[in-house]
Image (tube, rainbow, N blue to C red):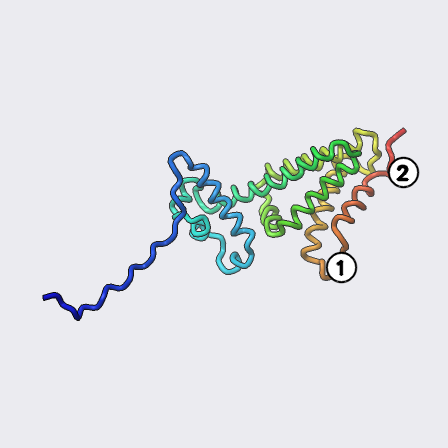
């Protein structure tokens, strides 16, 4: 006779949700999903204050197992470098788009538009911006590409006849460092000084690197 006193079996635990497995040959898709998961974590300051970025956390965010990450990234450092490189690519793409869109404007306006888009990226992505420039030794190539954009925009002023108060190279350094520094001041000293709008600062800055007459040589 069956034992009717036996306790019923407990209900089975629901299986952990996993993302659907990529089909054969979709490794690039998985790599991109891992990168996007990493970027979401970087942008989430509340989560990162509690749990530092780890491969386990990235795997959880991406819906994959931690070993799956090693198919594309050797370790957390390689993944972090790739994620930050992606952020530089986004900034460079934004600068290139405004460079193309402003090609009919005078050179001083093109420089201003380049600085404005740089500031907008920082305003819209403050945590990304902080991470990007937190360890510049690992991203020398990306820094050089940014420098090229500033150098091209400033050199164009002199090439079209506008008198600069500095050499083009020195002016490019001044513009980039001033814009970048002004963004950082907003984050660290905005409560101490009334800094005003960063875009107003950009307008004043682009005017200041030309001579008082501001016009082209006759």
Q: Residue furthest left?
A: 1
**Which numbered circle lies on residue 142?**
none
Residue to which mark 1 is pinned: 193
Q: Point out residue 144 in the picture as x, y percentages from the top left corner.
A: 63, 36
Instruction: In this rendered view, identify the residue nearer to me: 172 or 157.
Output: 157
Task: Give the x, y percent position of residue 161.
Answer: 83, 30
Between 100 and 143, the one lying in front of the other is 100
Callout 1–callout 2 Cβ contact below 8 Å: no
Q: Nearer the viewer, residue 88 or 44?
A: 44
Horizontal side of 50 relative to 165 (left or right) equals left
Pinpoint residue 27: horizontal percent, then vertical percent.
Answer: 42, 37
Horizontally, is 218 left or right of 104 in the view?
A: right
Q: Is residue 91 above or below residue 182?
A: above
Secondary element under disc 1, as helix, strand or loop, is loop
Q: Residues within 10 Å of mark 1 (few under 14, many from 20)?
A: few
> From the image, which quarter does the C terminus lie in?
top right
Q: Residue at x 52, y 56 (%)?
A: 48
Q: Give the residue drawn at x 73%, y 35%.
A: 102
Q: Which quadrant of the figure has residue 185? A: bottom right
Spatial separation of the CA atoms under disc 1 and disc 2: 31 Å
Identify whether 127 is placed above or below 23.
Answer: below
Quarter of the image containing the N terminus?
Answer: bottom left
> Would you name the residue on which mark 2 appears?
213
Q: Going 88% across and 30% down the picture, which residue do you hit?
A: 217
Which element type, helix, strand or loop, lies under badge 2?
loop
Q: Residue 64: x and y, percent?
A: 40, 47
């Amino acid at each position: 006779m069956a034992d009717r006193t036996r306790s019923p079996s407990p209900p089975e635990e629901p299986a952990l949700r996993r993302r659907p497995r990529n089909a054969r040959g979709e490794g690039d898709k998985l790599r991109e999903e891992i990168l996007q998961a990493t970027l979401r974590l970087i942008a989430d300051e509340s989560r990162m204050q509690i749990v530092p970025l780890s491969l386990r956390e990235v795997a959880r965010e991406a819906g994959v197992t931690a070993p799956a990450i090693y198919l594309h990234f050797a370790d957390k450092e390689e993944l972090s470098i790739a994620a930050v490189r992606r952020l530089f690519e986004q900034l460079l793409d934004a600068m290139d788009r405004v460079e193309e869109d402003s090609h009919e404007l005078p050179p001083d306006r093109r420089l201003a538009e380049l600085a404005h888009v740089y500031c907008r990226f920082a305003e819209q992505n403050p945590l990304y911006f902080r991470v990007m420039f937190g360890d510049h030794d690992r991203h020398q190539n990306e820094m050089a590409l940014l420098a090229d954009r500033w150098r091209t925009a400033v050199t164009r002023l002199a090439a079209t006849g506008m008198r600069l108060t500095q050499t083009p190279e020195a002016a490019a350094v001044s513009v980039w460092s001033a814009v970048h520094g002004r963004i950082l001041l907003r984050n660290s000293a905005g409560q101490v000084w009334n800094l005003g709008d960063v875009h107003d600062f950009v307008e004043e800055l682009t005017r200041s690197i030309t001579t008082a007459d501001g016009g082209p040589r006759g």
